[in-house]
Image (cartoon, rainbow, N blue to C red):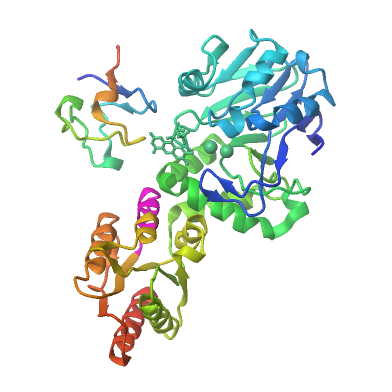
Amino acid sequence: MKPIEIAKDIYDVGVNDWNIRDFHGYSTYQGTSYNAFLIVDEKIALIDTVKKEFSDQLLENIAKIVDPKKIDYVISNHTEMDHSGSLPRVMHKIGEDKPLYCSKMGLKNLSRHFSQKWNYHGIANGEELSLGKRTLTFLETRMLHWPDNMFTYVKEDKILFSSDAFGQHYAGYEKFDDQIGDSIMPHAKKYFANILLLYSPLILKLLEKVTELGLEIDMICPDHGIIWRKDPGKIINAYAKWSSQAPEKKAVVVYDTMWHSTEAMAEAIAQGIVDEGVIARPIHIRSSHRSEIMTEVLDAAAVIVGSPTINNQLFPTVSDFLTYMKGLKPKNKIGAAFGSYGWSGESVKLINQELEAMKFDIIDPGVKIQYIPDQDGINACYELGKKIGKAIKG
Amino acid sequence: MDKYVCSMCGYIYDPKQGDMDNGIPPGTKFEDFPDDWKCPGCGASKEKFKKMRT
Ligand SMILES: Cc1cc2nc3c(=O)[nH]c(=O)nc-3n(C[C@H](O)[C@H](O)[C@H](O)COP(=O)(O)O)c2cc1C
Ligand SMILES: [Fe+2]
Ligand SMILES: [Fe+2]
């Protein structure tokens, strides 16, 4: 990707990672991008870098605009290596003594990843740095999603460099919301559901803070995917909605199965829910990536989980899903369990324990059926679905 | 009453304020938290906190 001038003298010098399909365990079926930004003012600043293997491309992109050695300041909004991985190459190229601005936690965390000898400047929240005509303001966004995260805001251009927040894993030649349209929203939603959901309370506070500060925002530049310039309010409103965790009239029935009995139960439950006029979807765990399932969970009112019993335990992929979901701390969910078994039948109890630990509202003890569900069994599942559908309708 | 800071994420606990978002009423001393108490910011354990100089 060649550099793109996103505003006068401000460039995206980042790269597309077209072929990545597994980003630290998150499925990226259309790749991703690592955005990095160069501001050419009286002083020249580079905001964030890219993954290590793309260091050359980053430096080539910068060189198309200015000699990299002329960079005066490097800003690290986030320590994670998709944005800091090229720092060693960049610092080596531009001079190891150049000031490196980051949050105080960034200073600690960068020192655990890279050289401790760099000329770190751990900012105070709200600190400013003048580039000449422009001023950078650094705003800590601790635990969104790492302790080191911060935003960099340029008040003269009303541009917010938001690090991972508002990002999407998407590689494309489109670089702006107006070029891609609504098809980017599922990617933004997936990013939120898998990276940020657990920090929803902090996001709500941050959005309040932004309103309180009266921060004017014409453009939001995240470190992944497209830039929001036509309608930054759209992604801000979407974040407000997702972090409020107000459920839609929708349920997901997530299960795994060995001989299709638990599967038949899942479909009967989903049918019961749908017959109450509520959207429902059975999701077979081994056919879907956990990050896709989480995206469906985000706005679902109910998460119904099914597993057969295997060696007195849950089917391992069901445990995987439950562990993953638990860490992301979804709120305001109805839950219920189901599963087929042969003799001991622990699965439903084990699922219920997990859902309880997640503070789901368990509206039914669940359905367990020995071996293959007969018509009575299917009816019991269907009735569970109806009960869930009614509860969702309220 | 001393303030404490989490060395892992920078969360600051101020006993004067408490942390009602996480169910801690104002006036609760850090020293009185149970040993298995976790940082409301990042989940780090209690021994990761350092007393703040005033
Ligand atoms: C999405 C995500 C969430 C993380 N959550 C935590 C966490 O809750 N607690 C923690 O101690 N570290 C957390 N980390 C930090 C990683 O554990 C850390 O980067 C570690 O060095 C990764 O080890 P690895 O290189 O073997 O994957 C998280 C990292 C990512 C990418
Ligand atoms: Fe990150
Ligand atoms: Fe990232």
Q: Is residue B5 above or below residue A51?
A: above
- Residue at 51 percent across and 47 percent down: it is A25
Which quadrant does the C terminus of chain A fall into? bottom left
Q: Residue furthest bottom?
A: A375
Position of A280 with respect to A234 (left or right) is left
Q: Is residue A323 magenta?
A: yes
- Residue at 22 percent across and 33 percent down: it is B26
Residue A234's x, y, as percent? 63, 53
Locate residue B11: give its quadrant: top left
Residue A16's x, y, as percent? 72, 41
Q: Is residue A136 above or below residue A337?
A: above
Q: Is residue B50 magenta?
A: no
- Residue at 63 percent across and 17 percent down: it is A129
Locate residue A214: give its quadrant: top right
Q: Is residue A168 above or below residue A61?
A: below
* Residue A154 in view: no
Q: How many marks?
A: 0
Q: Residue furthest right?
A: A64
Q: Is residue A124 above or below residue A370?
A: above
Residue A265's x, y, as percent? 36, 79
Query: Which residue occupies the foreground of this view, A317 or A16?
Result: A317
Which quadrant does the N terminus of chain A fall into? top right
Position of A20 with respect to A373 (left or right) is right
Q: Which residues are magenta?
A: A321-333
Query: Which residue occupies the foreground of this view, B21 or A200?
Result: A200
Position of B11 with respect to A140 (left or right) is left
* Residue A226 in view: yes
Residue A319's x, y, as percent? 34, 57
